[in-house]
Image: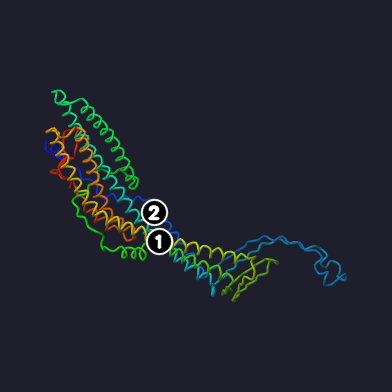
């Protein structure tokens, strides 16, 4: 029993392994309604191809009837014999009730049906467009998960920074109050420090709310509660590879699935023009039939009939409906052509912008790290100057504010740099799950020996350098 209690205690105090990016992405992948919708659309197009392909295949139709016939005939024979009929011959009406029935089979094999060819080609293009749409949604989901995940990390980093500021301000307020008590300070310094501390407390509440909102956004993608997320570990700033914007733009134009989807939709629309124009073409079918009929007129009559032949159908005039449908299809092609050009321009611009942002993030990360070092040194120097009397409490409060801003900038720069690579690949349309795995490898799981997070309420001091 004691061993079980010890094991339970160890499990309770063991650090919980946080949820990393890959686990969150896989949860979002399994529960994505939009992904299920495009898969359903793809299955619809695949079924539509089978319907279009049926235009080439034979059709066998059967029919059967069962009838009850009530027959009454008067004056039968008078048209042949006239008034010279002997008495009693055909003088009475003929009344007869009998049952009858028939069945028939008809086989139709299309020989020439130009519209069926166009229908299958258009369906193939729509299926390929549907497959591209699935890729588009999968890539967007990767980007959405990465953005939401690192938004949570960014909000948590902001909360840590503002808590650190609150702790430093609380320490400054305590020092100012102590100096006032011994006559070495002034009441203005105490009021300044208290006002700054109260503002930091309000900022902590705002930061916590922002963190909750960011987490709710992430959970909207996973459709389940998300535990503690794993933070970013040590990273090395790297420029884009290849480091030529023209190469990335060319890749985007050639491989972006959204462009591919639009191109295939355009191809399907062009096939629609052929489909509508071919409505004027003759249609040739080979036909064969067999029928049996009994008692349709006389109770004992039976009829067997078989037929084989060719049937030609030609639409001569349909009130201008064919021409109207052709014009509609041509207008649809023109609209998609302009949309494709706009999409090429937009994707090229987004790819170039993502490239420049990633390239810029390398310098920004280096500058943010130097700014953080300078802010720490400045705070230490201001504290020493305050002790020596060369700095005021206002200078110290400003140095504390500057350090918080530098901490925020440093974390934001780190997160922006590591997500910038995926954003560039997403803009070029080549992002995949392997990129999410590579980014996930940069995350670190906190261990039992790792320093505790900053919590000024419990008296913890912030670490010297954020890894």
Quick check: 145 above or below 296? above
Q: Nearer the viewer, residue 98 or 171?
A: 171
Decide if residue 81 is on the left or right side of residue 210: right
The way the protein has been coloured in the rendering is rainbow
**Quadrant of the rendered structure where residue 373 is?**
top left
Q: Position of residue 255 (x, y in %)?
A: 35, 64
In the rendered structure, find residue 333 and report the number of the disc placed on it. none
Q: Which residue is tagged 1?
A: 345
**Farthest-out residue, bottom:** 309
Report helix, strand or loop for mark 2: helix
Picture quarter with the N terminus: top left
Cα distance in 3D space between marks 2 and 1: 29 Å
**Farthest-out residue, front:** 390
Report helix, strand or loop for mark 1: helix
Picture residue at 37% right of the left edge, 56% below the top: 137
Q: Nearer the viewer, residue 35 or 333?
A: 333
Q: Nearer the viewer, residue 391 or 316?
A: 391
Q: Position of residue 401 (x, y in %)?
A: 23, 38
Q: Which residue is tagged 2?
A: 36
Q: Nearer the viewer, mark 2 or mark 1?
A: 1
Q: How dense is the environment of label 2, judged by Cα within 10 Å: few (below 14), some, or many (20 and up)? A: some
Quick check: 396 above or below 276? above
**Quadrant of the rendered structure where residue 452 is?**
top left
Picture residue at 59% right of the left edge, 76% below the top: 310
Picture residue at 22% right of the left edge, 45% below the top: 18
Q: Position of residue 188 (x, y in %)?
A: 22, 27
| Residue 230 seen from this side | no
Q: Nearer the viewer, residue 242 or 36?
A: 242
| Residue 149 seen from this side | yes
């Amino acid at each position: 029993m004691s061993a079980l209690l010890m094991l339970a205690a160890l499990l309770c105090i063991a650090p919980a392994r946080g949820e990393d990016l890959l686990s969150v992405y896989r949860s979002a992948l399994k529960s994505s309604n939009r992904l299920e919708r495009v898969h359903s659309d793809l299955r619809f197009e695949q079924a539509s191809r089978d319907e279009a392909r049926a235009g080439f295949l034979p059709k066998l139709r059967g029919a059967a009837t069962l009838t009850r016939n009530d027959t009454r005939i008067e004056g039968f024979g008078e048209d042949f014999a006239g008034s010279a009929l002997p008495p009693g011959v055909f003088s009475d009406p003929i009344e007869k009730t009998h049952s009858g029935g028939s069945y028939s089979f008809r086989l139709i094999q299309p020989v020439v049906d130009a519209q069926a060819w166009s229908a299958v080609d258009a369906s193939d293009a729509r299926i390929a467009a549907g497959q591209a749409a699935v890729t588009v949604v999968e890539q967007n989901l990767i980007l959405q998960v990465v953005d939401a995940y690192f938004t949570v990390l960014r909000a948590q980093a902001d909360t840590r920074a503002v808590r650190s500021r609150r702790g430093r301000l609380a320490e400054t307020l305590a020092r100012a109050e102590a100096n006032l008590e011994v006559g070495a300070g002034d009441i203005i310094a105490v009021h300044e420090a208290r006002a700054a501390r109260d503002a930091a407390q309000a900022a902590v509440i705002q930061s916590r709310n922002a963190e909750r909102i960011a987490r709710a956004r992430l959970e909207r993608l996973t459709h389940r509660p998300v535990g503690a997320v794993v933070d970013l570990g040590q990273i090395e700033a790297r420029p884009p590879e290849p480091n030529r914007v023209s190469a990335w733009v060319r890749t985007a134009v050639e491989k972006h699935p959204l462009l591919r989807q639009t191109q295939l939709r355009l191809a399907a629309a062009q096939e629609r023009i052929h489909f509508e124009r071919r409505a004027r073409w003759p249609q040739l079918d080979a036909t064969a039939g067999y029928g049996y009929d009994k008692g349709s007129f006389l109770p004992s009559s039976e009829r067997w009939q078989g037929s084989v032949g060719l049937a030609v159908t030609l639409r001569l005039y349909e009130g201008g409906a064919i021409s109207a449908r052709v014009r509609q299809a041509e207008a649809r092609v023109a609209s998609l052509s302009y949309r494709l050009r706009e999409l090429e321009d937009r994707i090229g611009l987004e790819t170039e912008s993502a490239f420049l942002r990633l390239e810029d993030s390398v310098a920004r990360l280096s500058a943010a790290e130097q700014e953080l070092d300078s802010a720490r040194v400045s705070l230490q120097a201001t504290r020493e100057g305050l002790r020596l009397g060369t700095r005021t409490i206002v200078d110290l409060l400003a140095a504390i504010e500057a350090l918080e801003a530098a901490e925020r900038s440093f974390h934001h720069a780190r997160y922006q740099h590591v997500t910038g690579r995926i954003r560039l690949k997403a803009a070029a349309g080549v992002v995949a799950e392997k990129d999410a795995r590579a980014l996930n490898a940069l995350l670190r799981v906190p261990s039992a020996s790792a320093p505790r997070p900053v919590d000024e309420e419990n008296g913890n001091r912030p670490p010297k350098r954020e890894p």
